[in-house]
Image (tube, helix red, strand yellow):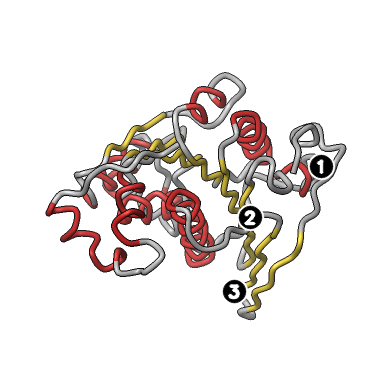
Amino acid sequence: MAQRVALTAADRARYEWQMWTPEFGDAGQETLKGSSVLVSRCGGLGGVVAYELAAAGIGRLVIAHAGNVKPSDLNRQLLMTTDWLGKPRVESACRRLNELNPDITVVGEAANITEENAARLVGDVDVVVSAAPLFCERFLLNREAVRQGKIMVDAAMYDTFATVTTVVPGQGPCLSCLYPENPPAWKREFPVFGATSGTAACIAAMEAIKAIAGFGRLLAGELLVFDLANLSFRKMKVKRNPACPVCGHLRG
């Protein structure tokens, strides 16, 4: 669990406006400073999640993303820049995050989530944010988050449509309760607007901040669904599956 770390005068100057939130205050900021978060993928979703968490003062960010920057990334992946085309995405992300907030620690993992690294990466942080486009990665993070008792925020999008939910092990359903199997029609490439992924990312970042600082109400047992084409937002209840192979053995 995150530990409270004393704030410096520079910290107070940087974060004072969010510290005015009554439920958050000094204690919340100190907890953010002592916390660590894994963000899976730093694309249109994960990149904005990481940017907001860096701005908010998360003490340590671990960013996992393989591959190099491509021209098609630049309509939405705000941690990537034109001058970084052909170079590793994770290096661009770390560079931009350190430029934004040099007082935090940013760790880059030049790999996507796999069976080989999932347990280690989840075990190295307090909270996980899943922003990967592929269900295989999302399921791996969900499995490890539940096994290790870590809160996981899951965000996904398609075109102008997006979803966000938060998995709190032992206190509600996990991602495998919501999606019992990999949707067969899901493809790696799909329509995407940066504004859609950015909206979902900001909500996911706030979920992570609330989970760490312990205020507000999380989307545990709920799926937030929105469509920016018609500006519709709704929350759907998600029931826990007692036979779920991932979380069915847990109480709560």
Q: Position of residue 111 (x, y in %)?
A: 47, 28
Compared across the picture, whether 9 is left or right of 174 comes to left
Q: Which quadrant holds the N terminus?
A: top left
Q: Disc number at residue 53?
A: none
* Residue pictured at 44% horizontal, 59% vertical: 75
Q: CA distance from mark 2 to mark 1?
A: 15 Å
Q: Amino acid at mark 3?
A: Leu
| Label located before the other in sequence (3 or 2) | 2
* Residue pictured at 59% horizontal, 74% vertical: 228
Q: Nearer the viewer, mark 2 or mark 1?
A: 2
Q: Nearer the viewer, mark 3 or mark 1?
A: 1
Q: Position of residue 172 (x, y in %)?
A: 71, 48
Q: Nearer the viewer, mark 3 or mark 2?
A: 2
Q: Disc number at residue 165?
A: 2
Q: Residues within 10 Å of mark 1 (few under 14, many from 20)?
A: some
| Label located before the other in sequence (2 or 1) | 2
Q: Amino acid at mark 1?
A: Pro
Compared across the picture, whether 188 is left or right of 8 comes to right
- Would residue 122 be visible to someone looking at this image? yes
User: Which residue in the structure is indicated by mark 3?
Assistant: 228
Occupied quadrant, residue 108 = top left
Outermost residue toward the top in this view:
116
Q: Disc number at residue 180?
A: 1
Q: CA distance from mark 3 to mark 2?
A: 17 Å
* The one of 106 and 167 positioned closer to us in this rendering: 167
Q: Which quadrant holds the C terminus?
A: top right
Q: Position of residue 139 (x, y in %)?
A: 68, 36
